[in-house]
Image (cartoon, helix red, strand yellow):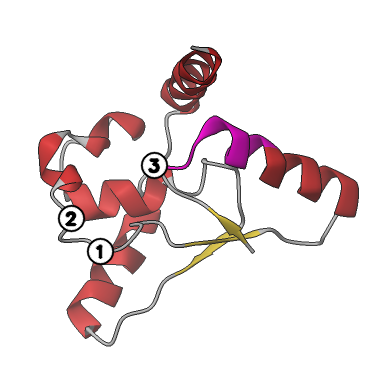
Amino acid sequence: MVRARLLVGADVLEAAEALALWWRPSQVWGMSPFGASTADAVWDRFDPRIFLLNSPSPTRIQAVFRSSYGLPRVDAVAVGTDDVGHRRELTEAMAYEIDDNVVREYRQLLRARQRV
C-alpha cells in the first residue's frame, strides 16, 4: 500500500513505483487520496477535474479520488469513511477515466519543482 494522491511529491511517487517494480506484487493499492480530509481548503482552490477525460459532471471529490489511481498507478485505493453517501460518491467516480497526458504533464511539473 502506497500513498496515492494529487498532493504526493515526485520523490514519493517515484519511490512507490520503484518498490512496485522491484517487488512485483499482483496488485498495488493506494491510500489516503485526500490527505487529511475531503473538506481541506485545497480542494476548493483548484479544479481537479482537469485530470479526467471529457468529464464535466464529476464532483471535485470524485476527481480527486479517481485521479489518485494514476499518482502513482495503482489497482485499488483504500479510504476510510462511515458516510454511505461519501462511499457512493467515490464508487461512482470509477466511471470516469484518467487523462494520462495531464497526469504525465503534472508529474513533469512535480519533478521540475523538486530540482529547484
Q: Tell me the distance, in whole angstroms, between the alpha carbons under discs 1 and 2.
A: 5 Å
Question: Which residue in the structure is indicated by mark 1?
Answer: 37
As rendered, which of 95 and 47 lies closer to the eye?
Answer: 47
Quadrant of the rendering where the N terminus is positioned = bottom right
Q: Position of residue 82 (x, y in %)?
A: 28, 87
On the rendered structure, is 1 left or right of 21? left
User: Quick check: marks 3 and 2 in contact, CB under 8 Å?
Assistant: no
As rendered, which of 36 and 94 lies closer to the eye?
Answer: 36
Q: Position of residue 107 (x, y in %)?
A: 51, 24
Per the rendering, the mark at residue 7 is 3
Q: Residue at x 51, y 51 (%)?
A: 4
Q: Amino acid at mark 3?
A: Leu
Q: Tell me the distance, in whole angstroms, between the alpha carbons under discs 3 and 2.
A: 12 Å
Whether residue 55 is visible, yes or no, is no
Q: Is residue 52 above or below residue 36?
A: above
Per the rendering, the mark at residue 100 is none
Q: Residue at x 41, y 71 (%)?
A: 79
Question: Which residue in the structure is indicated by mark 2?
Answer: 40
Labels 3 and 1: the sequence-earlier one:
3
Q: Is residue 19 above or below residue 39?
A: above
Q: Bounds of the magenta span?
A: 7-14
Q: Secondary structure at mark 3?
A: loop
Q: Amino acid at mark 1?
A: Ser
